[in-house]
């Protein structure tokens, strides 16, 4: 009788997790770079015109989000390095 539950799949090898984390770090960095460009454009345009309060808030928020993305990428990179070290040590043990 099928209860609708599926067997949980086995977790991926740590090497695969490390590689995926590296890709995520690059994606986050790319997003932060794109956000930095958007922030620069918004900031430049607000200097030229008389921006609304909402526009000023949006400019500040893009700056905050960009910094948060950079921090997150850095933390994920540290975690990935720790995983890589763990994998390396695991492979060396008999």
Image: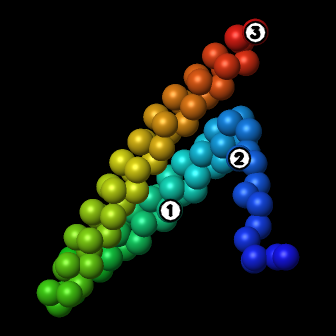
Seen in the picture, residue 38 relative to 71 is either above or below; the reply is below
Residue assigned mark 3: 94
Residue shown at 68% from the left, 36% from the top: 14
Foreground of the two, 62 or 52: 62
Q: Are marks 1 and 2 in contact (CB under 8 Å)?
A: no
Seen in the picture, residue 69 relative to 61 is either above or below; the reply is above
Dividing the image into 4 quarters, which one contains the C terminus? top right
Residue assigned mark 2: 11
Dividing the image into 4 quarters, which one contains the N terminus? bottom right
Seen in the picture, residue 24 relative to 43 is either above or below; the reply is above
Mark carried by residue 31: 1
Seen in the picture, residue 46 relative to 14 is either above or below; the reply is below
- Element carrying mark 1: helix
Task: Identify the residue at the far right of this view.
Answer: 1
- Element carrying mark 2: loop
Q: Is residue 74 left or right of residue 80?
A: left
Please say whether residue 89 is visible from this viewpoint.
Answer: yes
Foreground of the two, 79 or 55: 79
At which x and y percent is residue 38?
Answer: 41, 71
Task: Identify the residue at the far front of this view.
Answer: 1
- Element carrying mark 3: loop
Foreground of the two, 67 or 79: 79
Residue shown at 75% from the left, 77% from the top: 4
Please say whether residue 26 is visible from this viewpoint.
Answer: no
At which x and y percent is residue 20?
Answer: 66, 47
The mark nearer the N terminus, 3 or 1, is 1
Q: Residues within 10 Å of mark 1 (few under 14, many from 20)?
A: some
Q: Residues within 10 Å of mark 3 (few under 14, many from 20)?
A: few
At which x and y percent is residue 84?
Answer: 61, 28
Residue shown at 82% from the left, 76% from the top: 2
> Quarter-wise, where is residue 48 in the image?
bottom left
> Quarter-wise, where is residue 16 in the image?
top right
């Amino acid at each position: 009788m099928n209860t609708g539950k599926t067997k949980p799949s086995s977790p991926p090898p740590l090497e695969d997790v490390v590689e995926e984390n590296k890709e995520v770090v690059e994606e986050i960095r790319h997003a932060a770079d794109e956000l930095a460009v958007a922030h620069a454009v918004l900031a430049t345009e607000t200097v030229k015109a008389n921006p609304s309060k909402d526009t000023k808030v949006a400019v500040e928020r893009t700056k905050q989000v960009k910094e948060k993305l950079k921090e997150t990428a850095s933390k994920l990179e540290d975690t990935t390095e720790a995983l890589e070290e763990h994998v390396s040590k695991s492979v060396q043990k008999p």
